[in-house]
Image: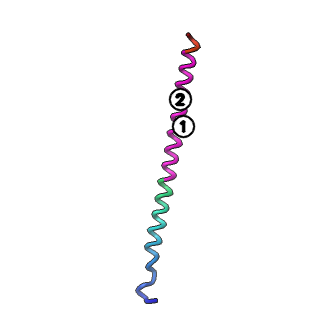
Amino acid sequence: MKQTQRGQVMPVLLLVVLAVLIVAVVSYNSSRATVSKMELINAADGAAYSGALQTARSM
């Protein structure tokens, strides 16, 4: 192996590892945002249901 060719795979490996980490972080953040949105929708649905139930009972 020539001296000038040593370590050529290291920059490529670092880029691949960086890309995998970025994908993992984006996936985690997206899943957290989706869970938060679902919880907010469930809370709004529960409030609307409770309000409608109270209105129906008072009639």
Outermost residue toward the bottom? 2
**33 versus 45 height, above or below:** below
| Residue 38 painted magenta | yes
In the image, what residue occupies the spot 53% across and 42% down?
35
Q: Which mark is residue 45?
A: 2
In the image, what residue occupies the spot 54% across and 26% down?
47
Assess disc 1: are there few (<14), some (14-19) or many (≥20) residues with their C-alpha within 10 Å of its C-alpha. few
Instruction: Locate the C terminus by quadrant.
Output: top right
Question: Residue 49, how many percent across, how many down?
Answer: 55, 24
* Amino acid type at mark 2: Asp
Outermost residue toward the right? 57
Scheme of image coloration: rainbow
Residue behind mark 1 = 39
Closer to the chain start, of discs 2 and 1, is: 1
Q: Secondary structure at mark 2?
A: helix
* Amino acid type at mark 1: Glu
Question: Residue 20, how many percent across, how many down?
Answer: 49, 62
In the image, what residue occupies the spot 50% across and 43% down?
34
Given contact means CB atoms under 8 Å apart, are the residues at marks 2 and 1 in contact?
no
**20 versus 2 height, above or below:** above
The count of marks equals 2
Question: Residue 4, how many percent across, how many down?
Answer: 40, 86
| Residue 8 painted magenta | no
**16 versus 59 height, above or below:** below
Assess disc 2: are there few (<14), some (14-19) or many (≥20) residues with their C-alpha within 10 Å of its C-alpha. few
Question: Which stretch appears magenta?
Answer: 27-55
Question: Residue 22, how many percent across, how many down?
Answer: 46, 59
Q: Secondary structure at mark 1?
A: helix
Outermost residue toward the top? 59
